[in-house]
Amino acid sequence: MRRDVFNGRVWSAAPHRVVDDDGTVLRLACWPGIESMAPTTWIHWLITGDDTVRKQAIPNLVRGRWQLGPWVWRDNTVVSWFGVDPDFSIHLFTPVDSGASHWYVNFERPVRRTAIGIDTCDLMLDLVADPDLRRWSWKDEDEYAQGRRLGLITDADHRRVSPARERAVALLETRGGPFAQHASRWQVRADWPIPVLPPQALSTPATP
């Protein structure tokens, strides 16, 4: 289970397949058909494209007013690396039908291990790169700024994210860590069962 936790409450929970784990770097996989729990505002935005709903997600989170609903992952297979850096995770998105893969760096609070998986808190900011790593751009800087204004992203978070941005770009440009792998070589094995939400997905206490 990969969960986002804010003020001790779960605001997203998604089961994954553990690909490998050396005690430091944890590699997970997620693919279409896996059911997760996500904020209803995020689900509504994905279905309707209504950006006003998307912009309400952060205020709801800060006020503790979010609700969770079921969401079935679609469109992409994702392999994720946690532990490469304490302040971000790295993800390779591969469309299941057509289109090119892309890399995604997700800035977040340091991952904590739990009885059922890992907990973190998404800090909204992302770095997106083409499969060949020749072009990259920042994503959701507006959400990051909004999170800063509303107090979701604390001064301590910001002090960690600023140098982490530089480390992420350096890792990408030097083809370090997961970026050393070719973007088209990874795929889900046909004999893997679909990961499912355990009964304690939301009730397991967040790691302090």
Image (cartoon, rainbow, N blue to C red):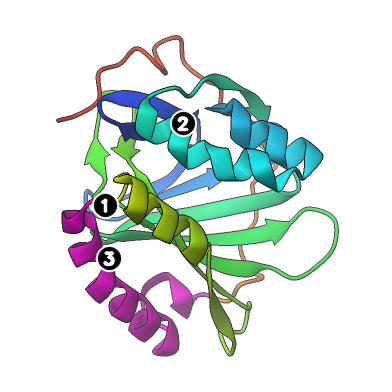
The span shown in magenta is 154-181
Percent position (x, y) of residue 80?
47, 54
Looking at the picture, does residue 130 appear above or below residue 76? below
Residue 35 is at least partly visible in this image:
no
Residue 137: quadrant of the picture: bottom right
First of labels 2, 3 by sequence position:
2
| Sequence order check, earlier mark of 1 and 2 | 1
Question: Is 142 rendered above or below residue 44?
Answer: below
Q: Position of residue 15 (x, y in %)?
A: 50, 30
Q: Secondary structure at mark 1?
A: loop
Residue at horizontal 42%, vertical 33%?
61
- Which amino acid, by three-letter code, is at mark 3? Val
Residue at mark 1 to residue at mark 2: CA–CA distance: 37 Å
Q: Amino acid at mark 1?
A: Asp
- Name the residue located 26 percent from the left edge and 46 percent from the top edge: 111
Q: Which residue is mark 2?
A: 60
Name the front one of labels 1 and 3.
Answer: 3
Alpha-carbon neighbours of circle 3 within 10 Å: few (<14), some, or many (≥20)?
many
In the picture of the structure, the residue carrying the numbered disc 1 is 22
Helix, strand or loop at label 2? It is helix
